[in-house]
Image (cartoon, grey):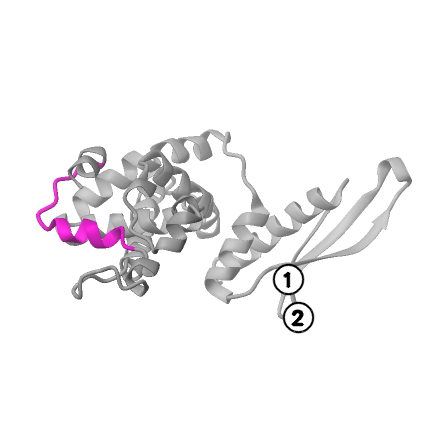
Amino acid sequence: MHHLEHLLGVRFRRLQLLNQALVHRSYVQGGRQSASLSDNETMEFLGDAVIGLVISEELYRRYPNLKVGDLAKIKAQIVSRTTLADIASALQLDRWILMGTGEVARGEGKRPSIIGSAFEAVIAAIFLDRGVVPASRLIKRLFHGEIEAVESGHSSVDYKSLLQEYSLRYFRATPEYKVLEETGPGHRRIFRVAVGWRGKTYGQGAGPSKKAASQEAAKQALEHLLAPIP
């Protein structure tokens, strides 16, 4: 724990909070814990909110004249599951995550969803133990590279992944893509694709391949979903 404190640049008053942030539910369900030890799922929920707040404040400060929808799209690029997992991997959080025996044997600790969730829980632990200022300072340091990449236009955006993450989180649904039509000669085919779920279409896109058209459809869907309410 002291090694991880050093990597984070944070000295905990209550080290048990950092310990809990690294307890996966499989460890608790496996009965290997003490009676007082809980898993990190509620801390993950809080950490997600703290990260969102800090990044939102940073984007508000950097881009005071951008519309709400544009700010939301930039935030979605920065605070993605891929980014969370990359930061967690750089911190080598998988070395400290406590998991059930079967999960350890399968190497589940390196899964992006698990390691990213553990990172969110660690942020919550810092927020609970030291307050918003140390948590904000760390978040801005760890996300600095991603913010700069988005700002310079060098971030490679996977709109399909962003849309799937958004729809699963807020709608509990998986996006479904449907090819509406194919036009043009064989060497110049144009595909038109729609994306939606639960019987509703959220976006359409066109492109020289199904993949390109699907990306454009996902982008249009995100723009629709993240547009400010008039």
Q: Position of residue 201 (x, y in %)?
A: 66, 63
Along the viewing direction, whichever of 101 and 51 lies nearer the viewer: 101
Asked if residue 163 can be seen in this view, the reply is: yes
Give the residue drawn at x 54%, y 39%. 157
User: Which quadrant of the structure image shows residue 203?
Assistant: bottom right
> Of the residues shown, which amino acid type is indicated by label 2?
Gly
Q: Is residue 211 left or right of residue 160?
A: right
Vertical arrangement, residue 150 with respect to residue 43, above or below: above
Near mark 2 (Cα within 10 A), the count class, few <14, some 14-19 or many ≥20, is few
Q: Is residue 142 magenta?
A: no
Residue under pointer 1: 196
Q: Position of residue 98 (x, y in %)?
A: 29, 51
Give the residue drawn at x 60%, y 55%. 221
Q: Is residue 172 left or right of residue 55?
A: right
Q: Is residue 112 left or right of residue 163?
A: left
Range drawn in magenta: 8-23
Q: Position of residue 132 (x, y in %)?
A: 19, 49
- Does dot 2 land on a helix, a strand or a loop? loop
User: Which quadrant of the structure image shows residue 91?
Assistant: top left
